[in-house]
Image: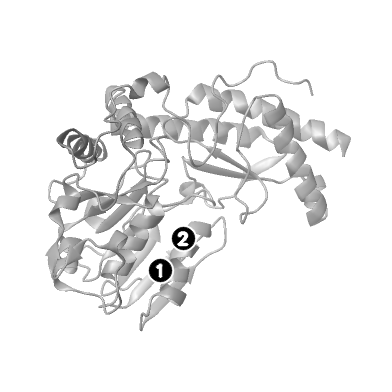
Amino acid sequence: MDKPSIKPSYPYFSSGPCAKPPGWSLNNLKNGAFSRSHRSEISKSKLKEVIDKSRKLLEIPDDYLIGIVPGSDTGAVEMAMWSMLGPRDVEVYSWENFGRDWTIDVLEQLPLKSFKDISANYGVLPDFSNSDPNNDIIFTWNGTTSGVRIKDASWISNSREGLTICDATSAAFSMYLDWPKLDVTTYSWQKVLGSEAAHGMIILSPRAIDRLEKYTPKWPIPKVFRMAEKGKLNKALFEGVTINTPSLLCVEDVLNSLNWAIGIGGLKELVNISEKNLSIVKSWIEKSENFEFLAQDPDTLSCTSICIIPKDKWFIDLTEELKIKFMTNFYSSVEENGAGFDFNSYKTAPLGIRIWGGSTVENENVSKLLPWLDWSYEFNKSKF
């Protein structure tokens, strides 16, 4: 097979930090509030602008609160769990690495009396059918390392007594979220927005706010997790006053991403771009003799973390050591030609490819990457 002659103009396919929005440059950040106190009026106004534009883009209900918190998406999920869990039994659903992290917190770290671990292997969803509306529920909307997303939130009861805590970091802005089903929703700036890491977002429904004001955990709550104190919600946190010092460089960068997203048509266009990326890969997979999706149910295919595994019998028959060696060479051949970077599968996931297809990744760049994957596979197979 001949080496392709056309490369992606922006060959970055990492699943986090993700590709910058088209047209990004350092010059876009020139109006940042650099060297100013994060408590100054200009800095607080920028933080509030992030909150307001996030609400507009994600179409978040007016009675939900939005806060900027430390520790990226991880910090936001931990904040919710350590502040709100305890009064009810807990169900935690996982089908890949990051969902499993929340399971570990519930099973091993938090002193909870009763919980259910409902898990599944990479490529499939767990069974949601026995979910109890009296329980608190923790789940990811999209499996970042498995390429499997939930079909919908119909399994969550509209008359539930418990809270739902949803890690939506690789779904928000590229997928429609069912807000009435979500009480706590988290994500980070580094994913679909393609902004800088370290900052998390936490979105609270009125039911979640009620829990914070009526329930105090028996265990100590670290400062960076505190959303309420003595039964009173820290309302300033949801108006641009952060718990710790944010990076105003990152704040300006995420504002650039939000402005870009609004400018191209908002959530509908963001979802369209990402779904088109999945459609491009689907068409390629249908013709491929070497690759298939990791997701076993086509209805669960992620449009952001698009996970693919080799299906070629030659590859399947290799020893595990040789599979690792081959895939390492496969990735390197594409990267050495500057045709694609960071599209390898996550370290704990099955060996394969993970193409980030979020909304900042232009469709034409996904189309131009795929011939390089075909070439690299055949090229390295011929040398093996």
Tell how many labels. Answer: 2
Residue at the extreme top of the image, as rendered: 5
The residue pinned by badge 2 equals: 99
**Quarter of the figure with residue 349:** bottom right
Which mark is on residue 92? 1
Residue at the extreme bottom of the image, as rendered: 113
Q: Residue at x 52, y 22 (%)?
A: 364
Q: Label 1, secondary structure: give it.
A: strand
**Mark 2 burial class by Cα count in 10 Å: few <14, some 14-19, many 20+:** many
Residue closer to the observer: 301 or 21: 21
Which mark is on residue 134? none
Q: Which amino acid does label 1 sit on?
A: Val
Quarter of the figure with the N terminus:
top right
Q: What residue type is labelled 2?
A: Gly
Q: Residue at x 18, y 33 (%)?
A: 42
Q: Which residue is drawn at 53% across and 58% down?
A: 97
Q: Can residue 289 be seen in this view?
A: no
Q: Which residue is drawn at 35% across and 33% down?
A: 249
